């Protein structure tokens, strides 16, 4: 298991908690818009924390100062040592959040059954039958469906989230995904940040990002199917039509489905 990096303090990656984020290097997808190609390709290694023992030492020193730990990537579930890592983090008393693409449901199931995660964030990148465009293996649809069902039935806190990037996302795609996770407690849409990406040639000269009005339309497309849909990103904080819930700064734009 290769630590690709660590963010020592984060106020946004684990909602409601002061957390540390561990980035594991390597991923089983190749999304053209991936904003951290070094992690995806397994090339990125932390200079300050070259192995997991250094990270464990850091977490030991932060007991009582941090509330939680986020295990992210890359894709954490491809690593055989993930369960052991989660067990060690939980033994220190931290709440643990897992970021995953949902392609390995058996790993997610084990972590849930053993009580090793408190929060799971699963990415929904595009229509499930289009994951081949992202480098997924054949048959990934059933794996994604199983992961979705696991979370919908789970007692842990979870969210589904989609990075809004063309041509993989539009109103029809968001509506289809929201139907797939019908009844989900939280569906978060995230604006694409135009920065370094894995395959810049894929997009040519056209921007793959959505403007604010289009992002709001995507949220409205999802609202009828999920308990709560939010738009993350401070630049998109304009209120939307429909009932609003709360004023948490992590939820700048929130709509709920009609009761």
Image (cartoon, rainbow, N blue to C red):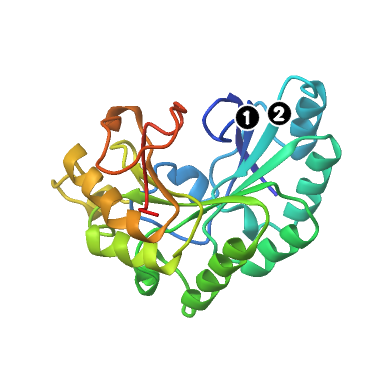
**Element under disc 2:** loop
Compared across the picture, whether 184 is left or right of 45 comes to left
Res. 209 visible in picture:
no
Q: Nearer the viewer, residue 217 or 246?
A: 246
Query: Where is residue 202, by image quadrant?
Result: bottom left
Residue in the image at 62% along x and 52% along y: 76
**Marks 1 and 2 in Cβ contact (< 8 Å):** yes
**Residue 127: x percent and y percent?**
35, 68
Element carrying mark 1: loop
- Within 10 Å of disc 2 (Cα), the crowding (few <14, some 14-19, many 20+) is some
Task: Check the image and report above or below for 186 versus 150.
Answer: above
- 16 lies left or right of 140: right
Q: Say which residue label 1 marks.
A: 17
Q: Residue at x 45, y 53 (%)?
A: 227
Mark 2 sits on what residue?
67
In the figure, residue 177 lies in which quadrant? bottom left
């Amino acid at each position: 298991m290769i630590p690709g990096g660590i963010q020592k303090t984060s106020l946004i990656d684990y909602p409601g908690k002061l957390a540390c984020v561990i980035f594991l290097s390597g991923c089983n997808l190749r999304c053209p818009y991936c904003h951290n190609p070094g992690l995806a390709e397994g090339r990125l290694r932390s200079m300050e924390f070259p192995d997991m023992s250094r990270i464990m030492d850091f977490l030991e020193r932060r007991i009582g100062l941090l509330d939680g730990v986020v295990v992210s990537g890359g894709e954490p579930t491809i690593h055989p040592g993930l369960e052991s890592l989660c067990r060690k983090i939980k033994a220190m008393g931290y709440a643990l959040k897992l970021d995953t693409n949902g392609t390995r449901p058996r790993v997610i199931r084990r972590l849930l059954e053993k009580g090793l995660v408190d929060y799971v964030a699963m990415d929904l990148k595009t229509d499930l039958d289009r994951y081949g465009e992202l480098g997924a293996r054949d048959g990934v649809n059933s794996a994604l469906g199983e992961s979705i069902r696991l979370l919908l039935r789970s007692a842990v806190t979870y969210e589904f989230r989609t990075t809004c990037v063309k041509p993989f996302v539009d109103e029809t795609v968001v509506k289809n995904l929201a139907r797939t996770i019908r009844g989900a407690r939280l569906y978060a849409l995230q604006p694409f940040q135009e920065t370094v990406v894995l395959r810049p040639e894929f997009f040519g000269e056209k921007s793959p990002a959505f403007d604010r009005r289009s992002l709001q339309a995507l949220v409205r497309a999802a609202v009828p199917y999920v308990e709560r849909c939010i738009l993350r990103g401070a630049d998109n904080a304009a209120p939307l039509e429909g009932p609003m819930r709360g004023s948490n700064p992590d939820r700048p734009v929130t709509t709920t489905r009609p009761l």
